Image: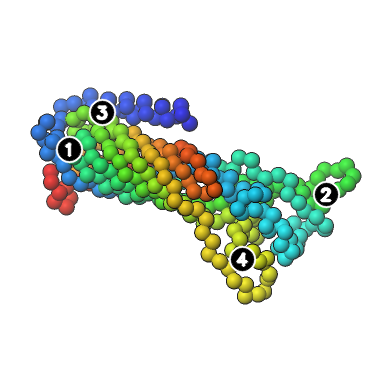
Amino acid sequence: MGKNIRLLVSLLYISALCIHDTFAQQLYGKEECKNRSGFEYGGTGGIYLANDKTADFYSGKPGNENDVNYVFSNFYWYEEIRKLLNFYDTVFVREYPEKMGYSPAFSFGLFVKYDLNCNTGFILQFYYAKLKANDYVSVEVDPKEYLTEPDIRLLPVKGVEERNMIDFGINHAFGLNKTARLTLGGGISMNNTLVKENSLYVEDKKYNLIRVYGNRPYIPNTNQQTYDIRQGGIGFGVFGSAGVRLEFSPSIAVEPGFTVHYMTVNLKEKPGFSPQFNFYVRLLFRDLLNFSN
């Protein structure tokens, strides 16, 4: 991942230099640059690559907050699984996911920037990503005492979470070229993570690993009370970003780039810091609501 990031930075820098050379005659004057203050605003969209460190939360391992044995230890669910897997006597878990990971996810949000001049400004951005983690739990059905091939089944285990992220910091565009410039930014970040699903699937039947019945076992055909269990929480960190600013007019700009967050994700008792990556494209507007030139 580190090599890919360095390669991307190099490509962004080379692209900025090439465009800079092509449009070198279109420059901000010093006074024009100083007077170019005001708000920019727009939307951002891209691909979010979450660190797999917290994906193990959804693996269903013993000791996790959501445990596969919670389902197998319930008499009624166990009998349902017996019919679904068509086993006679016993089923038990052989292996849990070792390296459960997140799939790449789309991210989108809003962006506001207050320009102090044509180079430097304060940024506030909000964006959202819905993450999914998928893997398998292997179970053995009716183990035999004599030598024979074991009957192994793979049961999908899935997790879904939502992340809302807010970044506040400073951004700087290098040079005075009106058309294309390299940008760097950084600041502080806050995220709010919410678990939406953690389930075990047996055939087409979904079993919720979250203990929505509290400390009471599930009993079918009863008006059993369920609880709204909130898993997740607030995390903090820092971020750095790099990109290329492409100005198509005094009012419209596009900024492709990437952001690296080094932050905590509150899915464990002692969440540690880990890097998260977001590759984005911003569409920015200014002076459309009579802001200063």
Looking at the image, which residue is at 56% across and 42% down?
Answer: 101
Lower position in the chain sequence, tag 2 or tag 3: 3
**Residue 284 in view of the camera:** no
Note whether 5 is above or below 200 in the view shown: above
What x and y, as percent, mark residue 197? 55, 56
Residue picked out by circle 2: 143
Residue labelled with disc 3: 19
Number of marks in picture = 4
Q: Is residue 22 left or right of residue 150?
A: left
Q: Are dots 2 and 3 in contact, CB under 8 Å?
A: no
Q: Earlier in the sequence, mark 4 or mark 1?
A: 1
Q: Quadrant of residue 66?
A: bottom right
Residue 14 appearing in the image: yes
Q: Which residue is mark 1?
A: 117
Give the residue type that dot 3 points to: Ile
Across and down, in percent, residue 106 comes to: 43, 47
Is the residue marked by circle 4 packed among few (<14), some (14-19), or many (20+) residues within 10 Å?
some
Q: Nearer the viewer, mark 4 or mark 1?
A: 4
Please name the residue that numbered disc 4 is placed on: 213
Distance between the alpha carbons at the discs numbered 3 and 4:
60 Å
Query: Which residue is more in the foreground, 142 or 57?
Result: 57
Amino acid type, callout 4: Tyr
Kind of residue at disc 2: Pro
In space, the residues marked 4 and 1 are separated at their CA atoms by 57 Å
- Tell me whether circle 2 and circle 4 mark residues in contact (CB < 8 Å): no
Marks 2,1: beta carbons within 8 A: no
Mark found first going from the N terminus, 2 or 4? 2
Check disc 3: other Cα within 10 Å, few if <14, some if 14-19, many if 20+. Answer: some
Query: What secondary structure is marked by label 3?
Result: helix
Q: Tags 4 and 1 in contact by the CB under 8 Å rule?
A: no
Q: Residue at x 41, y 39 (%)?
A: 261
